[in-house]
Amino acid sequence: MLPLKYDRLRNRIKNLGSALVAYSGGVDSTLLAFTSTVVLGDGCLAVLAISDVHPQHEIDDARTTAADLNLKLLEVETYELTDPRFSANPADRCYYCKAEMFSLLRHVADARGIKWVLDGTNADDASDHRPGRRAAREYGVVSPLLEVGLHKAEVRELSEQLGLPTWDRPSAACLASRFPYGTPITDEALGRVARAEESLRSLGIRQFRVRAHGDVARLEVEPEEMDRAWELRDQVTAAVKAAGFMFVAQDLEGFRSGSMNAMLGGEPAEKRTEDCSDDELA
């Protein structure tokens, strides 16, 4: 089944003729950009968005991966925080982010004679709380992984088979996803979260989020790493406080992608993923 899906993916991309891929260096967008480059050659352009909502280490990793895979890469800057609708952090915050980004990518594609803009949405994303999908539809963005029915686990398996360095990369999301809806997003708040997460990463913790609740940092750690995080609690506490938080708590439920969506009702948080995922470039 998986080889058949990958053949369908290649054929779908081939039929597009040319494509600009919204690239973040994450699992999904890397598979899409790599496959599009193999199929379309110079007809594929990977575009990486640079802004304050993206952790620096993810940007650096994306650049390295693009170079290693010989992707044709273009970097563009986005300015989400200049839009008060985004910085106010409403439940549909990601719509405004994606609308700005896809508008920019559409402009870049048109200027270079590229017909299609692609993103890395996969089949697991279809039922999640993802306002950004509305922006994708409005700007005619194509989601080939979704179209051929590739799920996240399958994307990882294919990436491993293809030798892509991202196959086991932890899931990521933009830093805005660390704040409860309605909490204003500022440069200072983003910087505090970014510093805290970078410090924890340096301690060897791999899959986690620092959720910001005012002066309280709620640390979500992958269940397999929770014991280690607890053993390192003195170092973790010192690191997070040094980043600017007053209190540090470890969430007993562990890491759940999109846990802030629990306040929206409907699906349990553990069945959702963040709209601002790495592979949607936000």
Image: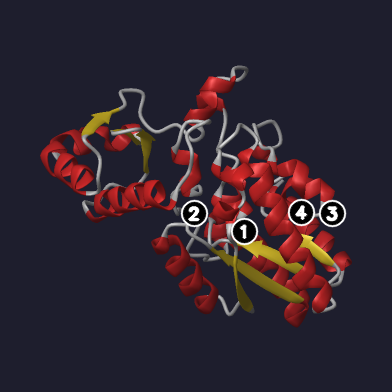
Marks 1 and 3 sit apart, C-alpha to C-alpha, by 17 Å
Name which residue lies at 61% across and 31% down.
91
Label 1: which residue? 29
Q: Position of residue 255 (x, y in %)?
A: 39, 33
Q: Position of residue 103 (x, y in %)?
A: 76, 59
Label 2: which residue? 53
Q: Secondary structure at mark 4?
A: helix
Amino acid on which the number 4 mark rests in the picture: Pro
Amino acid on which the number 1 mark rests in the picture: Ser
Badge 4 density bin: few <14, some 14–19, many ≥20, Cα 10 Å = many
Please name whichever residue, 279 or 107, is drawn nearer the observer in this view of the structure: 107
Q: In the rendered structure, which disc, 2 or 4, sits on the residue that comes first in sequence?
A: 2
Q: In the rendered structure, which disc, 2 or 3, sits on the residue that comes first in sequence?
A: 2
Label 4: which residue? 144
Marks 4 and 1 sit apart, C-alpha to C-alpha, by 11 Å
**Which mark's residue is nearer the viewer, 1 or 2?**
2
Q: In the rendered structure, which disc, 1 or 3, sits on the residue that comes first in sequence?
A: 1
Name which residue lies at 30% across and 54% down.
198
Amino acid on which the number 3 mark rests in the picture: Gly
Q: Position of residue 108 (x, y in %)?
A: 75, 72
Marks 2 and 3 sit apart, C-alpha to C-alpha, by 24 Å
Q: Quadrant of residue 70?
A: bottom right
Q: Quadrant of residue 30?
A: bottom right
Please name whichever residue, 121 or 243, is drawn nearer the observer in this view of the structure: 243
Q: Which residue appears farthest toward the left when viewing the image?
A: 234
